[in-house]
Amino acid sequence: MANSTIKNDKYKKARGGRSKLLNISCADCGTHICLYQKDGPGILKRMYLDRISKSEYENQQNYSLTDIAQLTCPQCKSHLGTPIIYKKESRLAYRLFVGSVSKKTNKKD
Protein backbone atom coordinates (compact mmCIF):
# COMPACT_ATOMS: atom_id res chain seq x y z
CA MET A 1 0.00 0.00 0.00
CA ALA A 2 3.03 2.26 -0.16
CA ASN A 3 1.70 3.84 -3.35
CA SER A 4 -1.79 4.39 -1.87
CA THR A 5 -3.47 1.61 -3.79
CA ILE A 6 -6.33 -0.36 -2.30
CA LYS A 7 -5.43 -3.84 -1.05
CA ASN A 8 -7.76 -6.47 -2.45
CA ASP A 9 -7.61 -9.49 -0.16
CA LYS A 10 -9.74 -11.82 1.98
CA TYR A 11 -10.40 -9.13 4.59
CA LYS A 12 -11.81 -6.74 2.02
CA LYS A 13 -13.95 -9.52 0.53
CA ALA A 14 -15.23 -10.52 4.01
CA ARG A 15 -16.51 -6.97 4.52
CA GLY A 16 -18.48 -6.75 1.31
CA GLY A 17 -15.71 -5.82 -1.12
CA ARG A 18 -15.99 -2.06 -0.57
CA SER A 19 -13.05 0.03 0.61
CA LYS A 20 -12.11 3.68 0.93
CA LEU A 21 -8.92 5.50 1.78
CA LEU A 22 -9.11 7.80 4.79
CA ASN A 23 -6.78 10.59 5.82
CA ILE A 24 -6.45 10.17 9.59
CA SER A 25 -5.45 13.15 11.72
CA CYS A 26 -5.24 14.08 15.39
CA ALA A 27 -8.56 15.44 16.66
CA ASP A 28 -6.75 17.81 19.05
CA CYS A 29 -4.28 19.58 16.76
CA GLY A 30 -5.14 18.37 13.23
CA THR A 31 -1.72 16.84 12.48
CA HIS A 32 -1.78 14.15 9.76
CA ILE A 33 -1.23 10.70 11.28
CA CYS A 34 -1.62 8.30 8.35
CA LEU A 35 -3.51 7.17 5.29
CA TYR A 36 -5.76 4.23 6.16
CA GLN A 37 -7.73 1.74 4.04
CA LYS A 38 -11.16 1.26 5.67
CA ASP A 39 -12.92 -1.89 4.48
CA GLY A 40 -16.69 -2.20 4.75
CA PRO A 41 -19.32 -0.04 6.43
CA GLY A 42 -19.45 1.21 9.99
CA ILE A 43 -17.51 3.48 12.27
CA LEU A 44 -13.75 3.42 12.65
CA LYS A 45 -13.06 1.61 15.96
CA ARG A 46 -9.68 0.13 15.13
CA MET A 47 -7.00 0.48 12.49
CA TYR A 48 -5.37 -2.72 11.26
CA LEU A 49 -1.61 -2.34 10.92
CA ASP A 50 -1.56 -3.86 7.43
CA ARG A 51 -3.89 -1.08 6.23
CA ILE A 52 -1.80 1.89 7.42
CA SER A 53 0.38 3.80 4.96
CA LYS A 54 2.17 7.13 4.62
CA SER A 55 3.09 7.10 8.28
CA GLU A 56 5.77 6.21 10.80
CA TYR A 57 3.31 3.52 11.94
CA GLU A 58 3.29 1.53 8.66
CA ASN A 59 5.10 -1.80 8.18
CA GLN A 60 4.60 -2.94 11.79
CA GLN A 61 2.29 -5.88 10.97
CA ASN A 62 5.12 -8.40 11.45
CA TYR A 63 6.15 -7.09 14.89
CA SER A 64 5.12 -8.72 18.14
CA LEU A 65 2.45 -6.91 20.16
CA THR A 66 4.97 -5.77 22.78
CA ASP A 67 7.21 -4.17 20.12
CA ILE A 68 4.48 -1.97 18.63
CA ALA A 69 4.49 1.65 19.76
CA GLN A 70 1.43 3.36 21.21
CA LEU A 71 -0.42 5.47 18.63
CA THR A 72 0.43 9.07 19.51
CA CYS A 73 0.32 12.37 17.69
CA PRO A 74 3.83 13.42 16.63
CA GLN A 75 2.92 17.08 17.16
CA CYS A 76 0.93 17.39 20.41
CA LYS A 77 1.76 13.92 21.83
CA SER A 78 -1.92 13.04 22.43
CA HIS A 79 -2.50 9.33 23.02
CA LEU A 80 -4.77 8.20 20.15
CA GLY A 81 -4.83 4.41 20.41
CA THR A 82 -3.28 1.31 21.83
CA PRO A 83 -1.97 -1.82 20.07
CA ILE A 84 -4.14 -4.93 20.30
CA ILE A 85 -4.58 -8.31 18.65
CA TYR A 86 -8.07 -8.42 17.16
CA LYS A 87 -9.02 -11.93 18.24
CA LYS A 88 -11.65 -12.69 15.59
CA GLU A 89 -9.03 -12.47 12.85
CA SER A 90 -5.77 -12.71 14.83
CA ARG A 91 -4.69 -9.38 13.31
CA LEU A 92 -2.63 -6.64 14.87
CA ALA A 93 -4.48 -3.34 15.13
CA TYR A 94 -4.67 -0.07 17.01
CA ARG A 95 -7.79 0.27 19.14
CA LEU A 96 -8.70 3.94 18.80
CA PHE A 97 -9.89 6.04 21.70
CA VAL A 98 -13.29 7.62 21.08
CA GLY A 99 -12.91 11.10 19.61
CA SER A 100 -9.11 10.90 19.36
CA VAL A 101 -8.86 11.05 15.57
CA SER A 102 -10.66 12.77 12.75
CA LYS A 103 -10.96 11.32 9.29
CA LYS A 104 -11.59 12.54 5.78
CA THR A 105 -12.17 10.44 2.70
CA ASN A 106 -9.12 10.65 0.46
CA LYS A 107 -10.19 12.09 -2.90
CA LYS A 108 -8.60 10.35 -5.86
CA ASP A 109 -6.69 12.61 -8.25
Image (cartoon, rainbow, N blue to C red):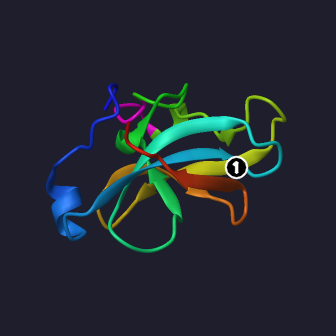
Number of numbered markers: 1
Q: Is residue 102 left or right of residue 37?
A: right
Q: Of all residues shown, which one is farthest toward the bottom?
A: 42
Rendered view: 52 above or below 94: above
Query: Is residue 50 on the magenta stretch?
Result: no
Q: Which residue is mark 1?
A: 80
Q: Residue 23: where, in percent of width, then height?
A: 54, 44
Q: x and y percent of residue 12 in the render?
A: 22, 58
At mark 1, the secondary structure is strand
Q: Amino acid at mark 1?
A: Leu
**Looking at the image, residue 39 lies above or below residue 43:** above
Magenta range is 60-64
On the image, which quarter does residue 6 sit in? Answer: top left
Name which residue lies at 75% across and 52% down: 27
What kind of secondary structure does the magenta stretch mostly adopt? loop
User: In the depicted view, which residue is nearer to us: 26 or 60?
Assistant: 26
62 part of magenta stretch? yes
Query: How busy is the neighbourhood of tag 1: few (under 14 within 10 Å), some, or many (20 plus)?
Result: many
- Of 5 and 15, nearer the camera is 5
Residue 41 falls in image quadrant? bottom left
Say whether residue 78 is left or right of residue 83.
right
**Quadrant position of the N terminus in the picture:** top left
